[in-house]
């Protein structure tokens, strides 16, 4: 069994060819990953522009005390008068500054009397004038290839007149839950030994959240041939196949055997010294990945967060950096194993500091999925760590903090 750090190093070393590049309409691109650098093709603004409503003037003319208003300059005007000394032109937010002007004095700083402004409070040179290229300059890389597109990127792309944008097509993820005891949603329970499947829906939600297209293949039984056929079909139609269950050492844990012996997969690693989820398996077939996760709900969720997210990013030409922060412990923490532990914690901000506690979190097996409800994050302890006291600091994986 390898360490958590070794498993991440092996995962990062997997060579994956990114998905196909496609061009789609801008307003369909949210959630996709850019397949090209976005480079400014012009300066913004292209000309000196007013940042406020006020009067375009020459800076030195403020010493005159009053200036005659000779014209009005609304935003989008077809023509703009040239400013001459001793005069002012009423100018609005977003208007181009008149030729000859160098400063904008706000309405609040003057008093209007007939056709003149009386200057009540002077402003510095260049006040409220947006210089050429203030927003961005021609040739500047504004958004890097591999960035996940959200509203901020859409704002910049629209300002650059991108009607369509080149993106990586969404990585295809298939999800399979294995186990004779599993019931699908809506399926009637007929035996006390049956339980409702949730893992496949949790994994689907995680994959979608981080930019994948998901096919949920539901539940299959612990039958060697059925598992083999399901995996082969999923591999034919997916980039990543994620399964839950069947990777431990039980008599009916066939997934690991199918992956190793029947699919021609190269096993990247099997077994990691982590809690929960030590029986995780990662394998590669051509440019496709098999991620076999444990069956307990909390285990499969944690290991999906640790390993599935980085794998999805690989298909978009990206390295995923786990968002780790130092957090202050507000309650005691009891170390339970000589493994790297990922413990569900309550995340909060207290007096401007990120803090975690374990109040209300239940002790027990790796099946307790309710521990992840609320404003949850995963606090991490190494195999060498011992118990911790309130006031100590601990590394915490804030998985909902989505770095672009």
Image (spheres, helix red, strand yellow):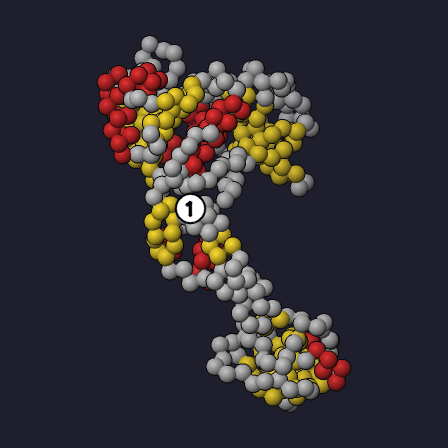
Name, please, the residue furthest toward the top. Answer: 251
Along the line of sight, which residue is nearer the eye, 71 or 18?
Answer: 18
Rendering coords of residue 86 (x, y %): 69, 87
| Tag 1 secondary structure | strand
Q: Is residue 385 above or below residue 318?
A: above
| Residue depicted at 42% across the width and 46% down the height | 33
Report if residue 129 is visible in the image.
Answer: yes
Report if residue 197 is visible in the image.
Answer: no
Along the line of sight, which residue is nearer the eye, 70 or 41?
Answer: 41
Q: Residues within 10 Å of mark 1 (few under 14, many from 20)?
A: many
| Residue depicted at 52% across the width and 23% down the height | 6
Name, please, the residue furthest toward the bottom. Answer: 114
Rendering coords of residue 131 (x, y %): 60, 68
Q: Total of numbered circles in the picture?
A: 1
Along the line of sight, which residue is nearer the eye, 175 or 327?
Answer: 175
Q: Is residue 221 left or right of residue 21?
A: left
| Residue depicted at 50% across the width and 27% down the height | 8
Q: Is residue 350 above or below residue 105?
A: above
Rendering coords of residue 34 (x, y %): 42, 48
The residue indicated by pointer 1 is 33
Q: Quadrant of residue 295?
A: top left
Along the line of sight, which residue is nearer the eye, 22 or 240?
Answer: 22
Rendering coords of residue 158 (x, y %): 44, 60
| Residue depicted at 59% across the width and 21% down the height | 382
């Amino acid at each position: 069994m390898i360490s958590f750090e070794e498993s991440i190093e092996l995962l990062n070393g997997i060579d994956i060819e990114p998905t196909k590049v496609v061009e789609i309409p801008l307003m369909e691109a949210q959630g996709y990953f850019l397949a090209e650098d976005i480079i400014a093709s012009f300066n913004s603004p292209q000309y000196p522009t007013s940042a406020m409503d006020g009067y375009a003037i020459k800076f030195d003319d403020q010493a005159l005390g009053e200036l005659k208003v000779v014209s009005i300059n609304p935003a989008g005007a077809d023509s703009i008068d040239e400013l001459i000394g001793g005069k002012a032109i009423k100018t609005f937010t977003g208007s181009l500054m008149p030729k000859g002007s160098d400063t904008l004095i706000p309405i609040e700083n003057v008093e209007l009397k007939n056709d003149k402004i009386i200057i009540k409070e002077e402003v510095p040179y260049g006040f409220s004038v947006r210089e050429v290229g203030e927003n961005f300059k021609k040739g500047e890389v504004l958004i890097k290839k591999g960035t996940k597109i959200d509203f901020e990127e859409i704002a910049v792309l629209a300002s650059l007149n991108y009607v369509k944008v080149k993106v990586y097509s969404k990585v295809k993820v298939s999800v399979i839950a294995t186990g004779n005891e599993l019931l699908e949603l809506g399926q009637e329970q007929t035996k006390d030994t049956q339980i409702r499947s949730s893992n496949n829906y949790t994994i689907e939600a995680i994959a979608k959240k981080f930019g994948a297209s998901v096919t949920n293949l539901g539940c299959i039984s612990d039958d060697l041939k059925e598992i083999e056929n399901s995996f082969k079909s999923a591999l034919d139609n997916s980039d990543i196949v994620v399964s839950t269950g069947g990777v431990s050492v039980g008599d009916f844990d066939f997934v690991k055997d199918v992956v190793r012996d029947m699919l021609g997969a190269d096993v990247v690693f099997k077994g990691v010294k982590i809690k929960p989820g030590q029986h995780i398996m990662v394998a590669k077939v051509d440019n496709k990945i098999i991620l076999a996760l444990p069956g307990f709900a909390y285990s499969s969720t944690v290991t999906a967060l640790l390993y599935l997210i980085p794998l999805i990013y690989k298909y978009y030409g990206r390295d995923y950096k786990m968002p780790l922060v130092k957090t202050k412990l507000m309650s005691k923490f009891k170390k339970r194993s000589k493994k790297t532990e990922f413990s569900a914690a309550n995340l909060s901000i207290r007096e401007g500091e990120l803090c975690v506690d374990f109040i209300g979190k239940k002790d027990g097996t790796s099946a307790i999925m309710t521990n992840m409800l609320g404003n949850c994050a995963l606090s991490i302890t190494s195999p060498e760590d011992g118990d911790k006291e309130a006031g100590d600091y601990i590394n915490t994986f804030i998985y909902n903090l989505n770095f672009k």
